[in-house]
Amino acid sequence: MVNPLLIKPQSIVVVGGSDNTNKPGGKVLENLINGGFQNLFVLNPKSDKIQGIKCYSNIDSLPKVDLAILAIPARFCYDTIVALSQKGTDSFIILSAGFGELNKEGKIIEQKILNIANTNKLSILGPNCIGVINENYKGAFTTPIPTFNPKGVDFISSSGSTAVFVMEAGIKMGMQFSSIYSVGNAIQIQVEDILEYFDNNYIQEESSNVLMLYIEQLSNARKLLKHSRSLIEKGCNIVAVKAGLTDAGSRAASSHTGAMASPEIVVETLFKKAGIIQCYSREEMLYVAGVLFYGLPNGKNVAIITHAGGAGVMCADALEKGKMAVPEIAGEKADELLSQLFSGSSVSNPIDFLATGTAEQLGLIIDYCNAEFEEIDEMIVIFGSPGLFDVKPVYDLLAEKINTSKKPIYPVLPSPINTEKAMKEFIENGKIFFPDESILAQAISKVNFKTPLFTLNKENNYNSNDTLNNIIENDKNRYLTPVEVSSFLDDAGIKRIPEYYAKNKTQLKKILCDINFPIVMKVVGPIHKTDVGGVVLSINSVEDALNEFNKLMQINDTLSVIVQPMISGIELFIGATRENDLGHVIMAGMGGIYLETLKDINTALSPISTDEAKYMIKSLKGFNILKGARGKKGVDINDFAIIITKLDRLLRVYYQISEIDINPLIASKNEIYAVDCRIKIDY
């Protein structure tokens, strides 16, 4: 739990404060002084005053303080925290390194600090962090200290160095910050805890509506999910980078869902459920945050306004690659606008008003896009300089239009040398700019097509039954038999192809009297039937069935053979894997070759509503096939979605299911049937 005094202390002591501002203790003290914090103390036995602040030689003589910032060697931190806590200090920022990130001894010190913190209800940020920068104090040992703006961007970072890199790059773009929190080794307070504090203290219309996260370790995914969704529902937008996606390596799994649920897929699924826009680099995160700062796109149709033809073309390519649109602008109003621009200009979109274009012309183009071109949802303005004239009037007008435009305007200023002075003034006007039009186009697309925040479907009127409970309790780690699997599918209400079991030819002949050809035969016993040649399709006669039965029974570990009528249709896939405290990650998509080679699937975190299931289906690459292509009948999307929610409901009741594959489902005529299913129990 984050103590409010960590966020808004009335008094601060810097333990290890120094006159040397090249050291953390000196730099954090300097930043606190320059930030205007008043009730400030220093603990250092070597001096009476440091940087003009009264210095105390020992803790006994120090007044009670709310927050202690430690910039001393790791080996001294535990005893210092114990002594200060006895004097009433209950919030600590440990800047010091040399803890668990260094060696086992450092890990032991961390554990001792955590134990005393938990016992005495202390708040510990760090160790090995750069500190805190917010409206109340500048408790960080780094530079630059960004301009504070309550409507700027909030940033929580696992890494101190990454926080500095993001600040530097963001400040250069004109980004202003509301707060920055670095959690470092996060022995107690983690990214999710700061997020919780933001959620509990969020004030609509006052708090920042853009939050950036850089996360190295997810310790409480459910807390991240809860408070991210809550913040987004209140009006905040969250963009995040999760590092270390591939550290866990490839997982060994016996099902499609288990194998495909890589760490990257799991994080992607969590972020989608939380409403977080996921990025994969600092640069991408900053561009997306900048787009959010200016406001969400109104739609996918973009007007590109530029005086540089090549930049406009590259921007258009990137937009359309991201499924945005650059619609042609034509007609009477387009001709009217063109007549007021220099000869050689073009308004078809991109709107190119040449290297000699003026501020007045730019203003005119923006006004037409706002008032006359209804097909346009937002504008990208690209304006650098070939060095012919002072661009200050253009940038001044652009800043004014950004303030007054009813449609979002995203400015690209790509000339850092020729327009350096005007660019600086643009930033001083409180504006963010984007250096690169193609990266901006990708960011706009990512924001425009972000996954909607679906209502959590927590209702479950489906109760467990004794038969299935008994099946689960028989063994805590095993694959269910085909008969047991059928019981689960039937209980969930998922239709399946009838199955008949034959252990010998006599049983098989009896089955063949009651079933129509063609048929499918599959072995019972081996987990991976296809890999061992244990599936035979399109059997059309009794003689062929008997021959294939002999071959199948010779396969190692085969206990019997399943016989099913063979149906044709579109192959689908659904499955799920349980991911520790996150719950079940559910996958749905195209089956058959689309699953094996293209992996055309979408994922969602349980619980899933029907609307979310439909979104999963409609976002598939092969959705046009599901709708019906080239005269072929498609799939009932609503029925497919309902099957996904039935699976979700089953998993919420029987949490002991660790993996389930239904592959394939066959959409045949007006029904969807489960053809093959594998269920693993593990708890």
Image (cartoon, rainbow, N blue to C red):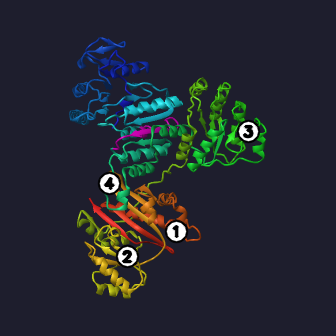
Task: Assign a secondary structure to mark 1.
Answer: loop
Estimate the spatial distance between the alpha carbons at disc 4 and disc 3, rounded to whole Å: 57 Å
535 lies left or right of 102: right
Q: Earlier in the sequence, mark 3 or mark 2?
A: 3
Q: Distance from label 2 to label 4 (Cα)? A: 30 Å
Circle 2 is placed at which residue position?
536
Mark sitting earlier along the chain (4/3): 4
Q: Is the residue marked by circle 2 packed among few (<14), some (14-19), or many (20+) residues within 10 Å?
A: some
Name the residue that disc number 3 marks. Answer: 345
Q: Amino acid at mark 3?
A: Ser
Please name the residue shown 41% across and 44% down the image.
Answer: 227
Horizontal side of 190 relative to 409 (left or right) equals: left
- Position of 100 relative to 256 (above/below): above
- Say which amino acid is labelled 2: Val
Query: Percent from the top left, x then y, of residue 385?
Result: 64, 29
Q: Which mark is residue 251?
A: 4
Q: Nearer the viewer, mark 1 or mark 2?
A: 2
Taking 522 as reference, is 44 above or below it? above
Mark 3 or mark 1, earlier in chain: 3
Confirm whether residue 381 shows in the render. Answer: yes
Distance of label 1 from label 2 (alpha carbons): 28 Å
Seen at 29% across and 71% down, the residue is: 481
Residue 560 screen position, x and y as percent: 28, 77
Q: Is residue 203 magenta?
A: yes
- From the viewer's perspective, is the residue at label 1 or at label 4 nearer? 4
* Residue of label 1: 636
**Three-letter amino acid code at the position of disc 1:** Asp
Residue 204 visible in the displayed image: no
Give the CA distance from mark 3 to mark 1: 50 Å
* Total tally of numbered discs in the picture: 4
Q: Residue drawn 56% across and 71% down?
A: 632
